[in-house]
Amino acid sequence: MHLALKIDVDTYRGTREGVPRLLSVLDRHGVRATFLFSLGPDHTGRALRRAFKPGFLKKVQRTSVVSHYGLKTLLYGTLLPGPDIGRRCREQLLAVRAAGHEVGIHCYDHIRWQDHVATADPAWTEREMRRAADRFGEIFGEHAQVHGAAGWQMNATAFNLTEGLGLRYASDTRGKEPFLPLIGGRAIRCPQLPTTLPTLDELMGRADILDADPVAHLLQLTEEGPPAGHVYTLHAELEGMKLLSAFERLLDDWKAQGWMRVALDDYFAQLDVDRLPACPVIAGAIDGRAGTLALQGNT
């Protein structure tokens, strides 16, 4: 049974502090993972505009955003200039690949993508994705093989570009199993490996499991696995920092449950791509996360 670890790296602080800590933990456990990087400026402070969107304030209260991200990070792009992650953290990014992990694209500007892609036109979308792809090439000297969209936010042009940019596979969606996304009636030949499990920050303080341990709840969901396995998304800013011990517990207990904890490339290698279902992508909600996300629809 394969359980793929997808690590989203959203911020400058997460890259500089969370990523090295995660590398140490993964090395101790002998586990590979996929790290997806934000490669341009950190404008996390601009996310405060979401305070007026339904569900955002509840998330802030539930997950103690300030304690996880730090006050300085929450000022980037507003009162403080946003540091350019790709330029200032090149050493940390290259260290991930040198340690044997898969590296890929999360986005160029995390907040810009998450806040605007849903309504963006094709020119804007292509510009943002090519910025990220070009920066990835500058740093790693090769083309990216995998893309995982910031906030699971996508549009039709973005899905088409996963194919056009030559990606082998992507993890831009939430769903139940790997699939080919149906966009405009056409199956995109870049398979989606959707996140299949809730994230820890989605479980923290959720009303229906208020008195339960989020880690224990997550482990209940993985007691039995679907034939295609699972994809779990974690964040360098959370599991790489204050939730590091919770992540170590997950690694130990997933091993005990019989899961092979792998990177997305290993997860992808065991799939029969020719037999993947073609599914539409719909906009929908996920418990514990504000707004709408790109979800796998039914065949």
Image: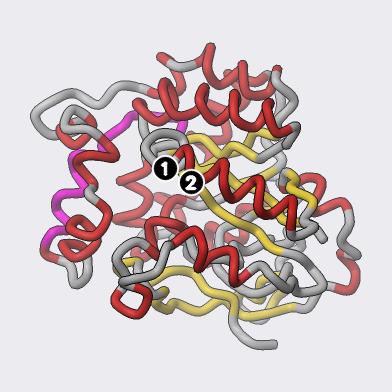
Query: Residue at horizontal 59%, vertical 64%?
Result: 219
Q: Which residue is mark 1?
A: 243
Instruction: Specify few, some or many for label 2: CA neighbours under 10 Å numbering under 14, 14-19, or 20 or more.
Output: some
Nearest the eye: 36 or 115:
36
From the image, which quarter does the C terminus lie in? bottom right
Query: Residue at horizontal 15%, vertical 49%?
Result: 48
Asked if marks 2 and 1 touch (Cβ < 8 Å), the reply is: yes
Instruction: Name the side, left or right, on which 73 lies relative to 282.
Output: left
Q: Which residue is mark 2?
A: 246
Image quadrant assignment for residue 34: top right
From mark 2 to mark 1, how far is it between C-alphas? 5 Å
Residue 275: horizontal and vertical position, in percent? 89, 74
Instruction: Specify few, some or many for label 1: CA neighbours under 10 Å numbering under 14, 14-19, or 20 or more.
Output: some
Q: Secondary structure at mark 1?
A: loop
User: Which amino acid, by three-letter code, is at mark 2?
Assistant: Ala
Residue 139: horizontal and vertical position, in percent? 58, 19
User: Which amino acid, by three-letter code, is at mark 1?
Assistant: Leu
What residue range appears in magenta?
38-51
Q: Secondary structure at mark 2?
A: helix
